[in-house]
């Protein structure tokens, strides 16, 4: 059996990657898991969750999968990409890695959106209150305890050095209109740092929530082909 462990982003939920997980389940017989990271059932619960809790939790799941399944793939979205990279570095039995909108250069909240123009591009025709970007990042992030934001910074610091040790095939996907993570800087870092064979896919019109983009089927097809190679 093949297992695919999908990791959502900071302050997010498995809903961020649900379209991808549903696609993989519909097109394979793989065991596709989308666990919720500690503290992420409610923004206020993040107060007591540390980056070590996130690592330990995901590592416990991965360890069990590596015992039970013939092949294990890791897919990480945003901060989940940092966790996926860290886990891959410390568990070389993982066969393939996919990094989606990975937050290797996650900035402090006041700097996340470089300009109003970027926000409007990602929001597109939605009203601001109904925008997934506004709800996911502006409204929710203001509710996150300060100590949790410090844990995010620690996660970034712990994870970034591991990418130079990734030795398995890696799929890198990025939305060209990402208003949360500067696309070019993230792509450049991953492409320049990871020594393993890499495949890059840029969904030019997509924002940060790349798995929920209107053209997400193109991404899913490319990713599944990579995993099946």
Image: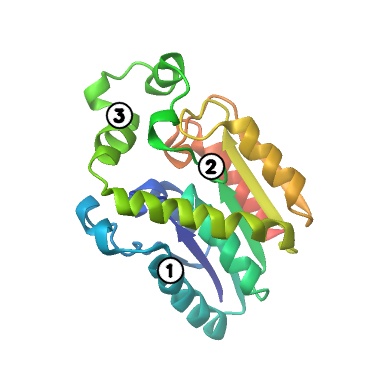
The figure's colour scheme reads rainbow
Q: Please identify the quarter of the rendering in which residue 82 is found.
A: bottom right
| Mark 2 / mark 1, whichever is N-terminal | 1
* Residue 30 x, y percent position in the rendering: 51, 67
Q: Are marks 2 and 1 in contact (CB under 8 Å)?
A: no
Q: Which residue is mark 1?
A: 52
Q: In x, y percent, where is residue 182? A: 56, 31
Q: In this orientation, which residue lies closer to the viewer: 7 or 188?
A: 188
Q: Residue at x 62, y 73 (%)?
A: 90
Judged by depth in the image, the label closer to the viewer, 1 or 3, is 1
Residue under numbered circle 2: 101
Which of label 2 and label 1 is nearer to you?
1
In front: 27, or 144?
Answer: 144
Q: Secondary structure at mark 1?
A: helix
Vertical relation: 228 (above or below) 2? above
Sequence-first tag of 1 and 3: 1
Q: Is residue 3 above or below residue 211?
A: below
Dot 1 surroundings within 10 Å: few (below 14), some, or many (20 or more)? few
The reply to whether residue 27 is visible in this rendering is: no
| Residue 122 quadrant | top left
Q: Secondary structure at mark 3?
A: helix
Residue depicted at x 44% and y 55%: 21
Q: How many marks?
A: 3
Q: CA distance from mark 2 to mark 3?
A: 17 Å
**Residue shown at 60% from the left, 42% from the top:** 173
Position of the C terminus by quadrant: bottom right
Q: Which residue is mark 3?
A: 134
Residue 127: image x %, image y %? 26, 18
């Amino acid at each position: 059996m093949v297992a695919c462990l999908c990791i959502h982003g900071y302050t997010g939920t498995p809903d961020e990657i649900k379209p991808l997980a549903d696609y993989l389940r519909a097109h394979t017989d793989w065991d596709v898991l989308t666990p919720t990271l500690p503290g992420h059932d409610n923004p206020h619960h993040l107060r007591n969750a540390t980056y070590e809790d996130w690592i330990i939790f995901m590592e416990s799941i991965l360890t069990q999968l590596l015992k039970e399944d013939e092949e294990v793939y890791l897919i990480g979205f945003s901060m989940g990409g940092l966790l996926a990279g860290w886990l891959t570095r410390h568990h070389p039995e993982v066969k393939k890695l996919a990094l989606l909108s990975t937050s290797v250069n996650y900035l402090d909240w006041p700097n996340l959106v470089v300009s109003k123009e970027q926000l409007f591009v990602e929001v597109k025709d939605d009203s601001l209150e109904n925008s997934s970007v506004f709800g996911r990042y502006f409204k929710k992030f203001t509710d996150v305890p300060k100590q949790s934001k410090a844990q995010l910074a620690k996660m970034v610091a712990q994870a970034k050095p591991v990418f130079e040790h990734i030795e398995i095939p890696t799929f890198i996907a990025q939305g060209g209109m990402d208003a949360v993570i500067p696309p070019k800087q993230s792509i450049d870092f991953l492409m320049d740092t990871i020594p393993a064979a890499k495949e890059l896919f840029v969904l030019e019109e997509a924002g940060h929530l790349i798995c929920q983009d209107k053209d997400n089927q193109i991404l899913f097809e490319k990713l599944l082909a990579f995993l099946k190679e």
